[in-house]
Amino acid sequence: MTRQPTTDAASAADEAEFARRLSALTLEQKVRLLTGADFWSLHPEPAVGLRRLVVSDGPAGVRGELWDERSPSANVPSPTALAATWDEPLIERLGGLLAHEARAKGVDVLLAPTVNLHRTPYGGRHFECFSEDPLLTARIGVAYVRGVQDGGVAATVKHFVGNDSETQRMTLDARIDERALRELYLTPFEHIVGEGRVWAVMAAYNGVNGHSMTESPLLREVLHEDWGFDGLVMSDWFAVRTTEPSARAALDLVMPGPIGPWGDALIAAVHEGKVDEALVDDKVLRLLRLAARVGALSEMPTTAGPPEHDAVSVAALLRETAAAGFVLARNEDAVLPLDRAALSRVAVLGPNAAVARTLGGGSATVFPPHTVSPLDGIRAALGDDVEVVHGIGVTPQTRTPVAALSYLRHPDGSGEGTEVRFLAADGTLLGSERRAGAAYTWMGSYGPGVPIGQVARVEVHTVVRAADAGRHAIGGSGIGRFRMSVAGTEVFDVRLQLPPGADLVEGLMTPPQCLHTVDLAEGEETQVVLTHDIVSAEDDIASADDAIGDAVTMFQLNLQPPQGSDDEEIERAVALAREADVAVVVVGTTEEVESEGFDRDSLALPGRQDELVRRVAEANPRTVVVVNSGAPVLLPWAEEVAAVLLAWFPGQEFGNALADVLLGVAEPGGRLPTVWPASERGLPATEPVDGVLAYDEGLFIGYRGAGRAGWQPPRYDFGHGLGYTTWECVSIDVQGAERPDADCTAQVRIRNSGARHGKEVVQVYAGRPGGGVERPVRWLAGFAVVEAAAGEEVVATVTVDARAFRHWDTEAGRWAVEPGTFRLEAGPSSTALPLTADIAFGRE
C-alpha cells in the first residue's frame, strides 16, 4: 500500500524520522530544497537521504522531462471527456495507467488533475478541467487521484483556486463571494484533499479577493486549518514574485528553479526575523513527507507499484475510455448505430477527419506514440468490402501547421526527419541531434554535452519532398530572430515578436509565423535550413518575465502542402456525400482558438465548417456530425442533421473508438459534464475590468442558472446523453434521511425498455422549493452508473452526501442546513427528472 496521511503509530514514527532528518540540515540546505533544481525536478539532499524528485505535466498524459517526440506518452482523453464518462472505476483504472507511464519515465509527481470549474465555455483551459459541477468534478477527481497514488506516484490537484479563465491570469484578481467560493470553487479541492487524500496542491497564478494565491491566507486557513492537509503546496510555474509574503504563506515549493524569489533572499529574511524559521521547517517537513510517499527517501521505501501495462493494454484502455466519454446528443430515426451489412460507400469528411485533434494546447501537450484518425479508424473497421472516401471540406485554421514528418528527409538521405544543430556565436558546432519531428522545445537544457550558455543559434536542416505538385508554404514559427534558406538561397531574415499584452504561453503555443512559398513538382526535393538565434528575453518576449524567456527555446518548422480553396473542397465534399450511404463529418476547433494561455472570443466553429455541415446534410439526409472539440461550440445546424456525436479531445485511439461507437461495437457512454449552449447570450465573461474579474453570477454557473432572469435555454442540458437503447424510470426510495448531518441513499429503479444491452447514468438532484436561502432551482446531489440487458430492471444505489443539503452561512462562517423540505429528483439529465421524493429536516 502507498503511504497515506494517518494518525496511527506508524505515521507517528515516520513523522519522528522526518523531524530527525530535518534537524540534520542547515538553514541554507533547507532553503535550497524549497526552490526547484530546474524546470522539472527538485534538488537531492544526500545529508537526509533525499534523491532527486521529478515532476511532470499533465492532464492528457505523462510528458516527462522532454517536450517533444523523443519521449512519447500515452495520450489519454481530455478531462472533459473523462468527466463525460461519469464512471469513477474507469477513471481510477486510467489513473493507474498514468502511474505506470510516470514510473516508466522516472516521474514521481504528476501535475494533475485540474479541477477548476467550467465557469464559462470561453475559458481557454475548459478542456483541461472536468466539469461545471463541483460534485461531478470532485468525484471524478478523487477517482483520478486514487488511481495515480495507488501506483506510488503523487497527484497534484490544481490550480488552487479561481483559475477558471486565462485572460490576464498572471495578475487578475478574481472576486468571488464567500458562498460561491465555498460551495462551488473550493468544493472539488476539499473532496480531493479529504476523500482522495491527495499528496500535493498547486497554487494558481491569479489572485482571489485581493490576495495573490501564492500569498493567499486561503492556503493556511482553508487547506491547513479547515481541511487538515498535510501535503505539499507548490507554485504554478513562475507564479511566485515575492519573498517574504509568499514564504509566510503556506506555500512550500517555488517552481521552477534554480532561480526564484526565495534562495538567498529567504535566508536573509529568516536571519533578519522577517520570516520565522519554523515556517521553513514546516515546508521542508512537507517536502520530506511527499518524498517518502513516492519512495524518494532512503530507508523509507513504499511497497506500492503501478499496474503493469503493455502497448496493447494501453491502447485497449484508451479506446474504451474514449468511447465511454462520447456523448450522443442527437440520433434521429436511430441512424446510429450503422448497419455494417447495409454499407457499400461511406464518406468521411471534414477538416478533422484525417488529422484529428486528440488533445488541447499548452502544458497538457504530450507526444503520443501514434494517433488513429477518424478516417483511419473507420477504414480499418470496415475493411476492403466498404469504400471509404474522404474530403477535407474546409481549412478552418489560418496558421500553417507544423511540417508533417512524411514531407521531411534527413539531409544525408537516410530517412524521414530533420537534423538539429547547436552552434556557438563563432559558428562552432556544439552538438547535434537527429529528430523525427518539426516542433522543438528545450527547457533549461539542450541535452547532454551541449553547454546551454554557449548556444547562440539553433539550425534545423532538412530536405522537403513534395507529395503533390503545386505551391508549398514553408517557414518557421517562434519568438525571436529567424532566417530560412531554400535550395541554398536565403528567403527571409525576420524578428518575430508577441503582440503587446500577450500571455507567454499563447506565444509559445501559437507563435507568430513567417512563410515563403515554393512551387514544387510531384516528388521534387529541396533543401531547407531554418535558423533561430538564441537571444535574451528582453529582446524577444516583452510581455514575459526574463527568467521564462531565458529558460525556454521553442519554435517550429512549418509546411502547408498544396490544397484546394474552401469553395472547391466544399463542392467536392458535397459530391462525395451525395453518392454515399452515410456521411460522417468531423468538425472541430483548432489550436488557434482552444489552448492554454488565452480565452476564446467566440464559440463558433472556426472557418466555414458550419456551411460545410449544412451543405453535406442537404446532399445526404443520413449525415452524422462528430464534434472534435474539448469544450462547447455552437451547433446552429443541429436540428438539420441525423446525428450529433460530441467526441471532445479523445486521445490517441480516437479513430478506433469512433468506429466502435458508429458501428455499435461500443455504446456512446457519455453524458454532458457541462451545459452545451445554444447561443452566446448571457455567458459569464473572462475579461477583467481594471485587473478585477467579478464572478457576478455567484452560485448560478452553468445549469444552476436555470430559471433566473436572462437565462438562455441551452442546446443540450447538463447530464444529457443518448445511448443505443431506451430506459424507463420506475421508482425512487430514499433511505437514511432522518438527520441532516448524515449521508442518505436513493434507490432508483429503472428498466431497460429497449432492444439491446445498455448503460445509463442515473442522476439525482436536490432542490429546496420555497426556501428562504437563495439557491439554484436544483443542483446535482449524487449519481450512479448502471447497466442492464434488454428488458431487465435494475436498481441504482445513489449516495447523497449530507453536504448536498447544506449551504455556507457567511455570517457564522460554517456550513448550515435550512430547516424544511428538500426535494430529490431522479432521472437521466438535469431537465429530465420524472421521479421525486421529499425529505424534511427540522432545526439543527
Image (cartoon, rainbow, N blue to C red):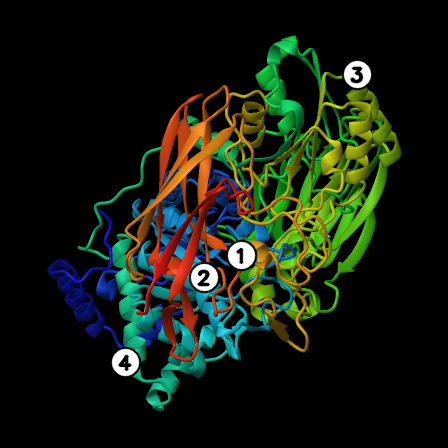
Q: Distance between the residues labelled 3 and 1?
A: 51 Å
Residue underneath mark 2: 38
Name which quarter of the figure residue 47 lies in: bottom left
Instruction: Identify residue type, mark 1.
Output: Met
Discs 3/2, front:
3
**Which one is earlier in the sequence, the residue at label 4 or at label 2?**
2
Instruction: Identify residue type, mark 3.
Output: Glu
Query: At which x and y percent is residue 337?
Result: 59, 22
Query: Could you tell me which residue is drawn at 54 percent across and 26 percent down?
Result: 724
Residue underneath mark 3: 579
Query: At which x and y percent is residue 659?
Result: 58, 24
Instruction: Identify residue type, mark 4.
Output: Ala
Q: How far apart are marks 3 and 2 (CA)?
A: 58 Å
Discs 3/4, front:
3
**Which one is earlier in the sequence, the residue at label 3 or at label 2?**
2
Helix, strand or loop at label 1? It is strand
Q: How far apart are marks 4 and 2 (CA)?
A: 26 Å
- Mark carried by residue 278: 4
Q: In which quarter of the image is the C terminus?
A: bottom left
Name which quarter of the figure residue 460 lies in: top right
Query: At which x and y percent is residue 694?
Result: 61, 72
